Image (cartoon, rainbow, N blue to C red):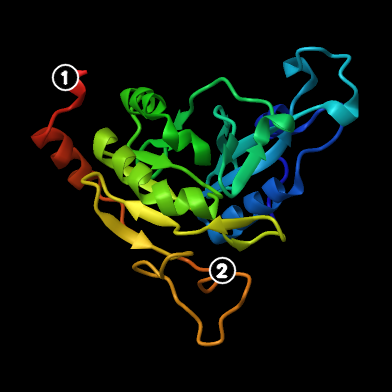
Amino acid sequence: GMPGDDMNTNVDVKIGEADGQSFTSIIEELRFIAYEAKLWISGGGVHTAVPQSDLVASTTPPNERKIYNTHVIIDSDGQIKAYYHKIHLFDVSVPGVNLRESKTTAPGKQLVVCDSPVGKLALTICYDMRFSEMYVDLVQSGAEVLLMPSAFTVPTGKAHWHALLRARAIEGQCYVLAAAQVGQHSEKRQSYGHSVVYDPWGQLVADAGGYDGKGLSGVIESQQDESSPVRVPSIIMSEIDLDKLASIRERMPRSEER
């Protein structure tokens, strides 16, 4: 099991506990997996309680309190290295999609970049990817790998998913890692899929597939599961080559022109 005494619990309390309620158990489970597997984990979005100190009105009744949509980075010792609360909330009404994330979720206020063995990670979530100025600031803060865990709707995914991610990779001269939910969540909701990795030249190097094809790495079962267009769960792997990233930035020095 995980050692208890040397765990960094200060961050846990900050992101997860409000009024004595402990934070979501999924974070504990991810910490255990990271520690046991000796791997770093990017986990998001995870719902975490808004601490009393962050509430605008401390008199807000418990049943009306909002949560944060949170992205957590856990290192290979099971420690929480960084966390980010999603800033841009998904309030959208387009054909086939009508969702208001702000009804239940409070927006974060802070951009987050953290060190890791594969370079400096920028923590973002899903809908954030439509706000390119956010990524300009993250890259100027040193980001080399842009993380965007997502659950895109099928209509918006088919229209924009690959274009947005590729654009963020090219303009930031960064790797983009976007883990994506896929398949049927409920009668009314399904996610587009296509977990992908783009390199800093905008080249697609891994794609787990989704609603409009199996991508580079996805598997379509002969006996298809009706809840997902591709085999789930699936794992895709990609190398992060920081020398390649440095070479691209050197040959096309964008940052000096901003």
Residue 123 visible (yes or no): no
First-in-chain label (2 vs 1): 2
Quadrant showing the C terminus: top left
Position above or below: 18 against 28: above
Look at 78% across and 31% down and name the residue there: 17
Rendering coords of residue 172 (x, y %) = 28, 34
Secondary element under disc 2, as helix, strand or loop, is: loop
Q: Mark 1: which amino acid?
A: Glu
Position above or below: 73 against 30: above
Residue 195 visible (yes or no): yes
For the residues labelled 2 and 1, the Cα–Cα distance comes to: 43 Å
Q: Residue furthest front?
A: 95
Q: Residue furthest bottom?
A: 222
Position above or below: 54 against 194: above
Taking 171 as reference, is 84 left or right?
right
Rendering coords of residue 241 (x, y %) = 25, 50
Look at 52% across and 74% down and name the residue there: 231
Taking 186 as reference, is 144 left or right?
left
Look at 48% across and 34% down and name the residue there: 128
Q: Which mark is residue 257?
A: 1
Q: Mark 2: which amino acid?
A: Pro
Which residue, given by chain and number where applicable, does mark 2 sit on?
A: 233
